[in-house]
Amino acid sequence: MPASPNCCTTTLSSPLNPEDAASLSSAFKALADPVRLRLLSLIVSAGGHEVCVCELTPAFDLSQPTISHHLKVLREAGLLTSQRRGTWVYYQAIPDALQRLSEVLVTVQSAVPQG
């Protein structure tokens, strides 16, 4: 459908396909929880280094199993990798996944008319 002369222009080259939308929505859904958003923030702020669950737990008033559950959700959403070493699990952010989320938000934000 052509844009009317009074309609705003958009920088979107094309809308998301259904597969990308489904993949991205699961990541955004995982981040919709404040604990998970903070966990991701703590891991990303480590500057690309791995972070042990034992380092994350003291930042919250939650049990270690609860923190581990939230980290599992982030991992299953494709935002984190993990590696078990002995009894501890170390987490690291996946830069490409975070970049994809960022690009979608920037594209959508740039398409919204500023008033």
Image (spheres, grey):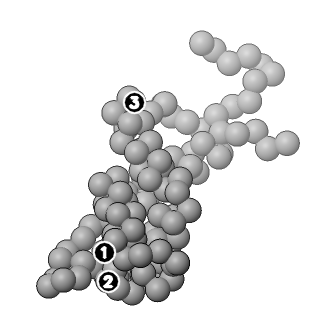
Label 2: state its secondary structure: strand
Among numbered discs 1 and 3, the one appearing first in the sequence: 3
Q: Is residue 105 above or below residue 81?
A: above
Left or right position of 10 against 71: right
Q: Residues within 10 Å of mark 1 (few under 14, many from 20)?
A: many
Q: Which residue lies at the image location 44% right of the left edge and 53% below the top edge?
A: 30
For the residues carrying marks 2 and 3, which lies nearer the camera in this image?
A: 2
Q: Name the residue that disc number 1 marks.
A: 91
Image location of residue 45, percent across then percent down: 48, 80
- Dot placed on the residue nearer the N-terminal end, 2 or 3: 3
Q: Are marks 1 and 2 in contact (CB under 8 Å)?
A: yes
Residue 1 position in % (x across, y down): 60, 12
State the residue at coordinates (42%, 81%).
57
Question: Callout 3, which amino acid?
Answer: Asn
10 Å crowding of disc 2: few (<14), some (14-19), many (20+): some
Q: Using a 10 Å C-alpha cutoff, classify the residue at mark 3 as few (fewer than 14 neighbours), some (14 to 19) or many (20 or more).
A: few
Task: Give the Cα separation between the discs numbered 2 and 3.
Answer: 36 Å
Give the vertical position of 89 relative to 19 (above or below): below
Determine which of the numbered discs, if any, sits on residue 17 in the image: 3
| Residue under numbered circle 2 | 52
Mark 1 secondary-structure assignment = strand
Residue 96 in view (yes/no): no
Tell me the residue at 39%/87% (across/down): 55
Q: Work out whether residue 11 or residue 49 is closer to the camera in this orientation and state it.
A: 49
Residue that appears at 35% across and 63% down: 69
Query: Label 2 is placed on what type of residue?
Result: Cys
Measured in 3D between alpha carbons, the distance from the residue under mark 1 to the one under mark 3, in whole angstroms, is: 30 Å
Q: Position of residue 42 (x, y in %)?
A: 48, 77
**Residue type at mark 1?**
Tyr
